[in-house]
Amino acid sequence: MHALLRSALAVVIALPPLGMASSGRPSPAAPAAVSFSPHTVDGNLAGAAFAVASDVRGDARQEIVATGFGHFTTVPGGPPVPPAAGRLALYQQRGPGLGSWSKRLVFDTDARIPFPNEPNVADVDGDGDRDIVVPGGFFACTSRCGSLTWWEQRAGGTWRRHDIVPPGSSPLFYHRALLVDFDGDGRRDLVTVGESLQPVSRIEGLPPASAWAQVFRGTDGPERFSREPIDLAPGGGALPVVADVDSDGDLDLASAQYFEPGAAFVWLERTDGVSREHPMGRFTTHVIDSTQGKAIQLRPVHDLHGDGRTTWVGSNHTNTAFPPGSTDPASQVVSFGVPADPRSRWTPTPLSSGITARGRAGQGAPGVFGSGDLDGDRDIDLLVSGDGDDRLFWLEQKAGRAFETHVLATGAGQAGGAVVTDLDRRRPLRNEAVFTVFESDSVTVWTRD
């Protein structure tokens, strides 16, 4: 989604609607043996951005939870003005199929939350229903706009707002917040990475950085979290994950890295346990890879190759077409196996082919990705947003741990979501693909024909 905002600031562009027609570029691979059809969930979510799927209402059917940034405003002779606030929408299936959806807003622009990012659906307050955590903000704001809020589900379909980081109160912005008991005290904490376009100082004795791993400690009070974060270490990026990276029995953190220079992918090793001086433990940042340029996402995929092992998959975020003479690495999705010494550099294996950002300012590719069986052959495929490449892709797993890149759709620039899930729970099981598209204000579900 980084290309989304950089391009909006660089130039206002109008693109054709999402469709199956050729984009004028050769397909990365021959047509797939299976085909997919789109179903529009919403064609009017202004600046559609992030999406997740979860059973919010407790009826055993998943809803789509999506954020919309709103539209940039053009100013004659000046750069576009970013939207003042976004919204969070909840889409519920109507009827037996996926062709009819109802839309309800959890919050609208009057909540004054600029750039609401990836929602996290979970029972925050332990009352048996699902609430929603919403990180927010981005560098495109004209002033501080980072935020962390959670929205308590109440009776009658209403939502109560709780501010952890009120909008504009921090120099950092947040894209993802994970609920996990990070310090082992029995309460779930919020683990996140705060980012800034300009480096900021957070830990005494360490230089300023553009990304800081942070934990907002869980409490027993009605707000559920401390408003003051505990800083772990510099490094990381928008979409962190919590995992035992080095298999030593404790929780570490791993992430792609975009604003902080020096690496594409990093992990933060927990080197000491919880203490009074270090209430979340002590952490050391290790470089996973520095050959892929800037990057947008890294996550573990269990049993990717059917061997019972966990493989790490990452997407970088580069542009080899602009500016002229660009030295960016190829735009691609790669995989990593964890080496015997996880503190050493990991070796990337390219999985995708033919992904190329558009040749103008503010574009980077690929974007976010998801994983799951898309073609029904019982192995794990990958679903990828082109982001600055205005195509949607799926990577079909073939024999020998190889992947073949297929174009799912064109005219879908700056897409988010990339969710692989079984929305309708029909038998036999068939996963669907969910994308948001910023440039067409749309939320779309793709089903296998």
Image (cartoon, rainbow, N blue to C red):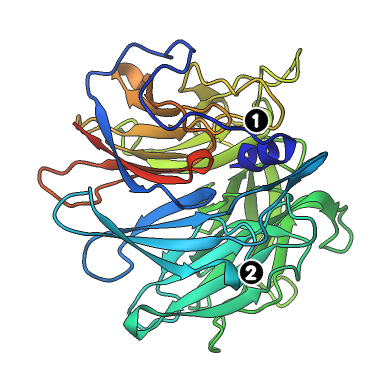
Q: Which residue is mark 2?
A: 112
Residue at (62%, 60%) from the top-left corner? Answer: 136
Viewer-nearest residue: 332 or 101: 101
For residue 28, what is the image quadrant? top left
For residue 206, what is the image quadrant? bottom right
Query: Residue 344: x, y in percent?
Result: 64, 34
What is the C-alpha distance between the residues marked 1 and 2? 27 Å
Please, what is the three-letter code of the amino acid marked with disc 2?
Answer: Arg
Taking the view exactly as shown, the residue that stands out farthest to the bottom is: 221
Decide: is 328 above or below 338. above
For residue 205, what is the image quadrant? bottom right
Query: Residue 110: x, y in percent?
Result: 59, 71
Quarter the C terminus occupies: top left
Viewer-nearest residue: 291 or 259: 259
Query: Residue 436: x, y in percent?
Result: 44, 44
Q: Is residue 21 visible?
A: yes
Q: Using the image, tell me which numbered label, if any, was put on residue 432.
A: none
Label whose residue precedes the other's in the sequence (1 or 2): 2
Decide: is 189 above or below 85. below
Crowding at mark 2 (Cα within 10 Å: few <14, some 14-19, many 20+): some
Query: Residue 363: x, y in percent?
Result: 65, 30
Q: What is the secondary structure assignment of the residue under circle 1?
A: loop
Q: What is the secondary structure assignment of the residue under circle 2?
A: loop
Q: Is residue 265 visible?
A: no
Taking the view exactly as shown, the residue that stands out farthest to the front is: 76
Q: Which residue is mark 1?
A: 363
Residue at (71%, 20%) from the top-left corner? Answer: 322
Q: Is residue 213 left or right of residue 63?
A: right
Please, what is the three-letter code of the amino acid marked with disc 1?
Answer: Gln
